Structure formats: structure tokens, C-alpha cells
Amino acid sequence: MTSAAPVTLPTIAFLGAGSMARAVLSGLLAPHVTVDGGIRATNRSASKAAELTELAGVTAMATENYPDANRTAVTGARIVVVAVKPAMVPDLLTEIADSLEPDALVISVAAGVTIATFESRLPESVAVIRSMPNTPAVVGKAVTGLSAGTRSSDADLELARALFDTVGDVLVVPEDKLDALSTISGSGPAYVFYLIEQLTATAIDKGFTPEEAATMVNGTFLGASMLLAASDDSPAELRRRVTSPHGTTERAVHKLEQADVKHTFDVATDAALARARELAAG
């Protein structure tokens, strides 16, 4: 879990600097984190690479200006984070394979790409770990799933954990659970935002202005989440305390139960899992 305790990590290369890579990168730029040898980052776009160059401790290169950018970035890097689009992964791995350090740890954040795909294209001395962080990494509140590869050691796994600890909580799971994890924590922020959207629309329909509705709904979700984080009680117990017998909340919750919200989440996450498997199959 994120803390202010000093963290020291070896040289890191980010290949691809999209929104998720930038979210993780934000944790590595915190004052209590030291990256010996600095951080390298590559991107296809020169303008996006220029934005990264403005960050202290980050050396960024654009492949559109420097074709060998990826190979240069991984040379001497102990940790290599592969954050390009899934379809680009096989060609990228072939490109960098002979430039990786013998003891490099390659961490994937490419959704749906298996560890086997990575290991089949990289030298046997290179360890692979697959990760699934989520977007609250931007504010240091991510939940990241990690799965060890067949060649990764306990030390490699702890190194990956230390990296993602800088942006939130970490769960280590077998790879066959990682896609399922992605349907809960990976996609989960979208579900929460969708619920906020719908409750806000309900408030507006009851006569509140959009600003008033946002204050009520956003504040309620934030407050409830903070209360849960500060409490030793389960969500079910906290809900029970708000739900007075025969009161208004009890009647509202009864309607939600009639709608079988649990079944809706089952169907939604099953659909997400099916899509993840489609992506993995190419």
C-alpha cells in the first residue's frame, strides 16, 4: 500500500507512455521514491515525448524521430515496463529482445497479452511479470494485480510489488485469475462512475440543479468510501447502520434487491471477461 516510507528502485524503462503508464509514472515521481539511474520513456509521438521530458528524472524519446528509441531505452534498465497497445506487443518484444539486460525484469501492462507470449519472444534469462493496474493510480489509490511468470523469482515479484506499491494496493494472483481481476478492479472505476452518473441524473429529475446534484452525489460517494476505509466494519454492516427498520432507506434498498443488482454485475463482468479472452486470442 502507498506510504511515505523511502523506496529505492533500479533504472526503469517505460515503453509506451499512454494514460496507464503515466499514472504509474506519477507514483515513481513522488518525493519518497528514488529511481537509481533514472527513468527512460518512449512514445511514438514526439509531442507526447516532449511532455514527459519536462518531468524531473525522466528521459523521453519518440520513435518517430529516433527509430532505435526502444532499444536505447532498455539498454541498462533493470525494469522494463511494456505499456504499448496489445497488438503492438509481439513486434516490440522482437525489437528489444537482444537489447535487454540479462537480468532484466519485463513487466507487462498490456491487457490480454499472456505471459507465454512474452516469454516466447524474450531471452530465457529475462523474467516476466504481468500486471493489471487501474486508473486511480493517478491519485495513489490503484489496485494492481500481479502474476508471476515461469522464470520470475520471488525477488522479481517483490521488485514489481515495490514499483506498484508507489501508486496503491497490490494483489498477487495466478495468471488464470488476472483477467477476472481486470473485470472487477480494472474496469471497476468505470462502474463506479456510471453509478454516480445515474444517481446524479435521478437527483436532477427530482428538481435539483446539476451543480446541487453533483455536490450531493459526489460527496456521498466520497464520504461513504472514506468511511469504509476508516472503519473495521464490512460494507454490509455499514449499510445496515444506515438502514433503519421500516424506514425510507430500507424501502429503497428493497427495490435495489428486487432489481437483482448482483446478477447485473455478474452479467456485466462475465461480458468483460469474455472480451478479455477474445483480445488474448487475437
Image (cartoon, rainbow, N blue to C red):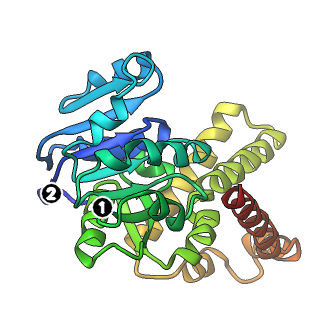
Q: In the shown orientation, is residue 245 left or right of residue 8?
A: right
**Quadrant for the C terminus in the image:** bottom right
Q: In the shown orientation, is residue 138 left or right of residue 134?
A: left
Q: Is residue 1 visible?
A: no
Q: Is residue 277 visible?
A: yes
> Which residue is painted at 29% across and 65% down in the image?
125
**Which callout, 2 or 1, points at the residue further toward the start of the chain?**
2
Image coordinates for residue 94, horizontal then vertical, percent = 46, 47
> Which residue is painted at 47% across and 70% down in the image?
228
Image coordinates for residue 114, horizontal then vertical, percent = 55, 64
Q: Please, is residue 122 above or below residue 77 in the view?
A: below
Q: Are marks 2 and 1 in contact (CB under 8 Å)?
A: yes
| SS assignment at label 1 | helix
Q: In the shown orientation, is residue 188 left or right of residue 154?
A: right
Image coordinates for residue 17, horizontal then vertical, percent = 43, 35
Which numbered circle lies on residue 7? 2
Mark pair 2, 1: CA separation: 9 Å
Q: Quadrant of residue 74?
A: top left
In this orientation, which residue lies closer to the viewer: 77 or 273?
A: 77
Few, some or many residues within 10 Å of mark 2 (<14, 14–19, 20+): some
> Which residue is painted at 50% across and 41% down in the image?
84
| SS assignment at label 2 | strand
**Quadrant for the N terminus in the image:** bottom left
> Which residue is painted at 62% across and 57% down in the image?
187
Amino acid on which disc 1 is placed: Asp
In this orientation, which residue lies closer to the viewer: 12 or 168?
A: 12
Which numbered circle lies on residue 165? 1
In this orientation, which residue lies closer to the viewer: 198 or 114?
A: 114
Q: Please, is residue 238 above or below residue 199 in the view?
A: below
